[in-house]
Image (cartoon, coloured by chain):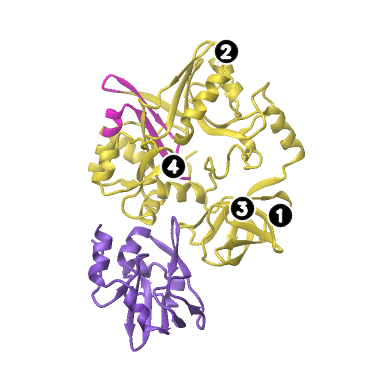
Amino acid sequence: MSKVIEGLYYTESHEYVKVEDGFGYIGITDYAQNQLGNVVYVDMPEVGDEVTAGEEFGAVESVKAASDLTSPVSGNVEEINEALEDEPELINKDAFANWIIKVKLSDKSELDGLMDAAAYTELIEK
Amino acid sequence: MTENKRTCLYDKHVALGAQMSPFGGFDMPIQYSSIINEHNAVRQACGVFDVSHMGEVSITGQDAERYVNHIFTNDIKDAPKGKIFYGIMLYPEGGAVDDLLVYKRGENDFFLVINAANIDKDVAWMQKNATGFSINLKDESEYYGEIAVQGPEAQDAVENILHYPCAELAFYTFKTDKYKSETIIISRTGYTGEDGFELYGSHDFINNMWDLLMESKRVVPCGLGCRDTLRFEVGLPLYGDELSKDITPIEAGLGSFVKIDKEEFIGKDVMVRQKAEGVQKKIVGIELKDRAVPRHGYDVMVDGKKIGEVTTGYHTISVDKSVALALIDANYAAIDTPVQIHIRKKLFDGIVTKKRFYKKNYKK
């Protein structure tokens, strides 16, 4: 069973965003890391780049496939999770603790279009 | 869409919780636990693969030897009984119909092992080219199941868990044995770069062997995911990637399995010419500086110009590097030539290397 955390926002493409003090921490869900298998590389944007809701901003590569990352929200990239550069497998250990990018949210209303934990749980249990 | 076939071990894979995926017309296990765990089990201890999807063809009759030598690039003439040959079946233009193993069971008695996805095509090709040869050609793919027991502890597993003595078997040889009333085949072969064995027999036999290995708890069930990472690291080709209708064995770097000194075989003219004059494109290894992962079909570039494509790529498990096999313009094929691979929106620097990223550990 994949873990789903209350209070986060989720996309249909299995990203999550955790919102704290106007910042969004974006990563992939536990379900996504389970499906991908061993993660060997995370292709991240650079600090200062702009990401746009619904658009690709990088990729997570497992041994067998590359999977695009789609941003749940728009904003400026404030930080990237540099630990993933040397230890991409941290995503397999705990996908929710190991967010990929931290974004300054430019439009909080975008969150309304995302799923809550209950809706996401229903999606992955279908 | 036709439904995928299932091997005789299908229910066991599902019960073990394997991730199943289509491969070569079959629903096959890709992984049970994780590709990395399974890969490491084969490099360090012992893993078992269900490879029952592979096809088996028997060729017997008074012209069997002459016929096999006609459709196959390696030379089996006067070979001792019990020997196995790797080689390629060619179109007259030099492209590959398939790569395969030929087992010599006796005088004019051969057992051919072919790729799952190519069974129908290969059998049709063999039949078409059998005119004028007195042979019996029998597709036995439905009868045979196959498992591969691979890794440094494979001999111990086959001897002590399955109770088939095999220490005396040399690499690329086989023997037959009895199981109940049937004849089974044990060969010292594999597709992982490690020592190992492949067992062929009825579905009943294969299920029995699989159960014994699982009950022992000493052999890890391995899916096709790690079969590909293992074969890739030691530079073994996969039909469809490094060898195909459009990639000749010389271009694939498999010239040592093409015996142009033998009297004749389909595709010989092109092989003689390519060996003498060289080739325009070639399979090479490429090592990247970054961790980004090159994948099949990605472009290989030099000075902004496309010079080829990746055929297989991984962030390798045994050597922790991002590497690829690629088919590129032979002018850039020299070792250490700087090249770039286009991965998503960026170009990543690399150099041409040998095709072998990890050393084979065969028991010769």
Q: Which residues are magenta?
A: B179-207
Q: Position of residue A48 (x, y in %)?
A: 51, 83
| Amino acid type shown at disc 1 | Tyr
Q: Which chain is yellow?
A: B
The residue positioned 55% from the left and 45% from the top of the image is: B241
Q: Which residue is mark 2?
A: B133
Q: Are marks 3 and 4 in contact (CB under 8 Å)?
A: no
Q: Are marks 2 and 4 in contact (CB under 8 Å)?
A: no
As drawn, the label of residue B309 is 3
Q: Quick one: SS at disc 4? A: loop
Horizontal arrangement in the rendering, residue A120 relative to residue B151 (left or right): left
Sooner in the amino-acid sequence: mark 2 or mark 1: 2
The residue positioned 46% from the left and 70% from the top of the image is: A55
* Farthest right residue in view: B277
Mark toward the viewer: 3 or 4: 3
Letter of the chain that mark 1 sits on in the rendering? B
Q: Which residue is mark 4?
A: B195
Q: Is residue B195 magenta?
A: yes
* Quadrant hosting residue A104: bottom left
